[in-house]
Amino acid sequence: MTKISVISLTTLAMVLGGCGIFSPEYHQPKIDTPVSTKNGTMIESSNIDFSQLEWWKKLNDPVLNQLIVLAFANNAQIQVAQGNIMKAEASLKAAQYAWIPTLSALGGGFAGNTWASSLTPQGALAASPAAQSGNIANMNFSGLYGGFVPSYSFNVFANINQAKLAKASLDMQKALYNATRLTIIGQVSGGYFTLLAQKKQLALQEQMIADLMELRRLEMIQVNNGAADLGNITSYDQEISSNQAKLPKIKNSISQTENALRVLINENPGIIVTNGSIDKLVTDNLIPANIPSSVLKNRPDVIQAEDSLKMANANVGLANSQFFPTISLTGFAGGASEALSNLFNLGTGFWMGSALVSMPVINASTYERVNVEKGGYYAGYYSYMQTVKSAFQNVDNSLTNKENMDKIYAETLKSYKAANDNYKINQIQFKAGNSALNNVIKSKLNLDNASLGLLQAKSQQLDALVQVYQALAVGYAAESELSKPKVLAD
């Protein structure tokens, strides 16, 4: 009986794994990559990896940097994704270990006695005390045997495709993990920008109320002097109350945003201390002039779609494997079985005989299972193509949106500067005695409104920046010792 070796199994796996008739060979679909986006950004052929670029650090905000580190390390959704990777890794090892034999315990015993008193002892038996005494009739004897018998018994083709399926599943879980990290970057940075905007809005709203109350006071003086109508006072009262009613809403929004950020870093609801201002966040020249084509291939959703396609391809192979028998590769004591020895010896008729004995009964449902998996691959192929096209669309839309938000901010900034100039002119005229204080306060209220408009434009610009980096899948692979997710002890 021939001993089986690891080399034999490896060779067998390579031979069978390369047979396209058992498992269809996977080919990555060809993609027609655009050369530029609608706004003129060039997509160049390059393998620059943006996934490790920590774009948020370019804004020089320590609080934002710390929040993202804490989110990477503690976020519950990232931990869930990490756990799914661990499960997929174990499944892949299980599929790979299918080539390792199972050890079956084998044991037993025997006992008996002699009954033929006329036999003549020979060899070692003749030298035994019992034989020499002549009392070999009714002599008792017993013994034990035991051990472990390794046995390889599997459907070779099913194992090959099961390993491919497990590998694709692991790759998909890694893509989901990266997608989760990318989402968390967007949620933390977007939430932080929103929080800064809300705090600035609260300050501007309170300033506007103070300016309205000052204007009402000045107007009341004129009413008392008979120089103004009392109706103006009621109009100011209405405007003051309307603006005061906005304060609780803004404060509530701040609280909700802070709590959302706290949850993202896996902390209980509480306050987020911000030392910076939204005005200090400079977004100029943060978007690269050209985009490497590798960026789109590194998007987690594109990777996930291709992994799904690989899984569908492996499922076709698994369905095809039902047409082939389960083969025992080893016999007693780990030697090669007759099945393995004659596996490729078609002249012996073993293949047909083995198929008749150990292969599942083939019926219409077996054939249809193959068709089902082929249909799954067909759907997966076009799902992948659609994902890639949607990725192109997402990138193009986000870059166009960012370009337009920059234009809106630039025009709003001009409006703000004009309002600020008008306020300064009124201050100068008042000090020169050429204008009333009321005009100064009115121009200040106009500046307050312009400030709110500029804040909104800035907030939209930052939101557009986050959308671009999300579309380009930037930063999800950035890692440090502090940002590594915590793993529970065994």
Image (cartoon, rainbow, N blue to C red):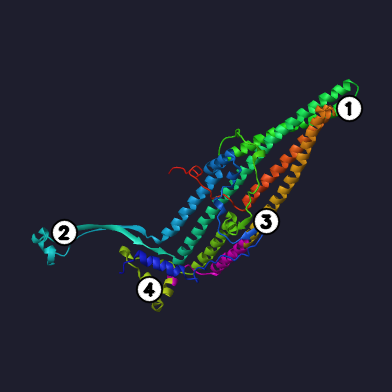
Which of pointers 3 and 2 indicates the residue nearer the eye?
A: 3
* Kind of residue sitting beneath label 1: Gly
* Kind of residue sitting beneath label 3: Asp
Identify the residue under disc 4. Answer: 342
Q: CA distance from mark 3 to mark 4?
A: 60 Å
Task: Describe the element under mark 1 as helix, strand or loop.
Answer: helix
Q: Is residue 10 left or right of residue 319?
A: left
The numbered mark, 3 or 4, whose residue comes first in the sequence reads 4
Extreme-top residue of the structure: 224
Query: Which disc number belongs to residue 231?
Result: 1
> Residue 157, position in %: x, y?
46, 66
Are there few (<14), some (14-19), or many (20+) residues within 10 Å of tag 1? few
Instruction: Answer with the quarter of the image where residue 28 lies.
Output: bottom right
Magenta extent:
355-384
* Kind of residue sitting beneath label 4: Asn
The numbered mark, 1 or 3, whose residue comes first in the sequence reads 1
Magenta-colored stretch includes residue 380: yes
Query: Which disc number belongs to residue 139?
Result: 2
The numbered mark, 3 or 2, whose residue comes first in the sequence reads 2
Q: Is residue 437 left or right of residue 9?
A: right
Identify the residue under disc 3. Answer: 396
Q: CA distance from mark 3 to mark 2?
A: 95 Å
**Residue 99 can be seen, yes or no:** yes
The numbered mark, 2 or 4, whose residue comes first in the sequence reads 2
Are there few (<14), some (14-19), or many (20+) residues within 10 Å of tag 4? some
Q: CA distance from mark 2 to mark 4?
A: 46 Å
